[in-house]
Image: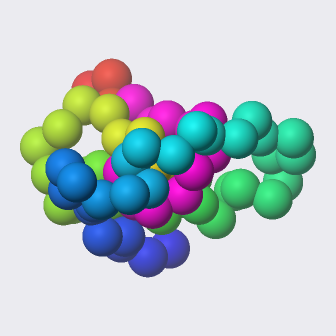
Amino acid sequence: MAERIIRKFGDPVLREKCKPVANIANILNLLDDMAETLGSASNGAALAAPQVGVAKRIVVINLG
C-alpha cells in the first residue's frame, strides 16, 4: 500500500469523464492505496479515484 497525492482544484484529471470498472481484480491495489490515503492524509469522509489522479468510477468511504 502507498499513500497517494490528493489532487487539488484545477488539476485536469478532475475534469475528465471517468471510466467504469470492468474487473475489480485490477483495482484492488488502488483501493488499498485510496483507503490509506483517506485515513492518513486527510480528515475526510470519502475519497474518489479522480482525487488521486485515476479517472475511474471508484470511491472509498469512511463510515467510522
Please give the count of numbered marks on the rendered protein: 0
Residue drawn at (54%, 57%), measured in percent from left and top? 54
| Residue at far bottom of view | 2
Residue 55 position, x and y percent, is: 57, 50
* Vertical arrangement, residue 26 with respect to residue 38, above or below: below
**In the image, residue 59 lies in the stretch drawn in magenta:** yes
In the rendered image, residue 62, in percent from the top left (x then y), is placed at 33, 32
Q: Which quarter of the rendering shows the C terminus?
A: top left
Residue furthest to the left: 43
Point 18% across, 38% down: residue: 44
| Whether residue 34 is visible | no
Identify the residue shown where x is 44% and y is 56%: 13
Task: Let me know if residue 36 is in the magenta part.
Answer: no
Q: Could you say which is closer to the camera, residue 7 or residue 11?
A: 11
**Above or below: residue 25 compared with residue 29:** above
- Above or below residue 20? Residue 12 is below
Residue displayed at 11% across by 43% down: 43
Viewer-nearest residue: 52 or 12: 12
Query: How is the structure coloured here?
Result: rainbow
Instruction: Tell whether 52 sits left or right of 20.
Output: left
Q: Position of residue 42 (x, y in %)?
A: 15, 52
Q: Residue 57 appears at what percent x and percent y?
A: 61, 36
Q: Is residue 60 above or below residue 35?
A: above
Residue 14 in view:
yes
Side (left or right) of 25 relative to 43: right
Q: Which residues are magenta?
A: 51-61
